Amino acid sequence: MRDLDVNTQNLVLQQTVADHVVMHGTGLHSGAETVLRIHPAKVDNGIVFVRKDVTDRNNLIPALWDRVVDTQLCTVIGNKDGVTVGTIEHIMAALSALGISNAMIELDGPEVPIMDGSSLPFIRAIEAVGVRQQDAPLKVIKILEEITYTEDDKVVRLMPSDHAEFAITIDFSHQSIGRQSYALSLDGDSFTNEISDARTFGFAHEVNYLRSLGLCLGGSLENAVVLDEQKILNPEGLRHNDEFARHKLLDAVGDIFLAGTRIIGAYDGFKAGHAVNNRALHALYANPEKWVYTTLAVQESPKAAQLATA
Ligand SMILES: [Zn+2]
């Protein structure tokens, strides 16, 4: 990687929340009632989680790719003292989509509350207080050459583009899912309008198995789409015919934001989940000649999502 000389005028700026946000919900795996608070943070802070219930060790966990300690059921980050925060991907997707670069996220437990299983409650709560621009340009990652991570039949590619674009294809043998694709650019409100309400999903036999292990204790039809062998069990059905692909795209936006900033480039995922998303970020940082840090010129809208490279 190399830093570019920049003219500091008319650049997209770093942003934080304009005021404090408080949310109450349930941990998907722990089942514990959890209070989440999002606080404004200073320039270059990044997104940092704070475990307020942990007082005898370092309770700060930066939301970064090299802090990921588990990706089996959700994305979990941790610090050297073994303090972890799980299920961060849906709030990370909301922060990325709203162009929040700096925030302190306090929790009184080990897991971000699942809310309704989507990113929409986080989007709505942050929009209610607003977003504040800060007095420093946003540094983004611009992909110069394709980076591909492959594992079995799963593929993640990060390709050059002038926008932050995401495309995903999923392929499940279940008749209610099958093969689905979805693509969008993070420009404008497309994430909020098309993706943010897509819920996480799971299979009833897996839910029962996880419960036998003491996991998924907070999981219910209120916060996930659940399928048995034949059908969708939620009485209200789906929010979109392709809600499954939309949710996997939502997860990818959240997981890829663990790069530490927005990536200007095209993410293309095939059967990609939390594990390969994180390994793709390891591949990104292992190939620093294939990207640069740069800043972005403001287009007519001040919203950070309206991006063009400087
Ligand atoms: Zn998810």
Image: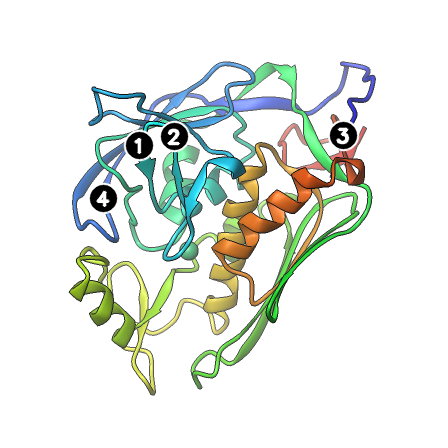
State which image quarter holds ligand 1.
Answer: bottom left
In the rendered image, residue 170, in percent from the top left (x then y), is placed at 55, 71
- Where is mark 4, residue-wise? 25
Instruction: Name the quarter where the N terminus is drawn.
Output: top right
- Element marked by disc 4: strand
Q: Which is nearer the eye, 267 or 131?
A: 267
Q: Are marks 1 and 2 in contact (CB under 8 Å)?
A: yes
N-terminal of the two: label 3 or label 2?
3
Residue drawn at x 73%, y 31% as measured from the top left: 300
Q: Which is nearer the eye, 297 or 219?
A: 219
Kindly report the distance in space between the C-alpha atoms of the residues bearing marks 1 and 2. Answer: 6 Å
Q: How is the protein colored in the picture?
A: rainbow
Which image quadrant is residue 213 in? Answer: bottom left
Instruction: Name the quarter where the C terminus is drawn.
Output: top right
- Of the numbered discs in the image, which one, if any, rests on residue 271? none
Q: Is residue 47 above or below residue 34?
A: above
Instruction: Look at the image and tell me whether residue 235 can be seen.
Output: no
N-terminal of the two: label 4 or label 1?
4
Residue drawn at x 35%, y 45% as measured from the top left: 121
- Where is mark 2, residue-wise? 79
Which image quadrant is residue 292 in? Answer: top right
- Element marked by disc 2: loop
- Where is mark 1, residue-wise? 83
N-terminal of the two: label 1 or label 3?
3
N-terminal of the two: label 4 or label 2?
4
Q: Which is nearer the eye, 297 or 207?
A: 207
- Where is mark 3, residue-wise? 1
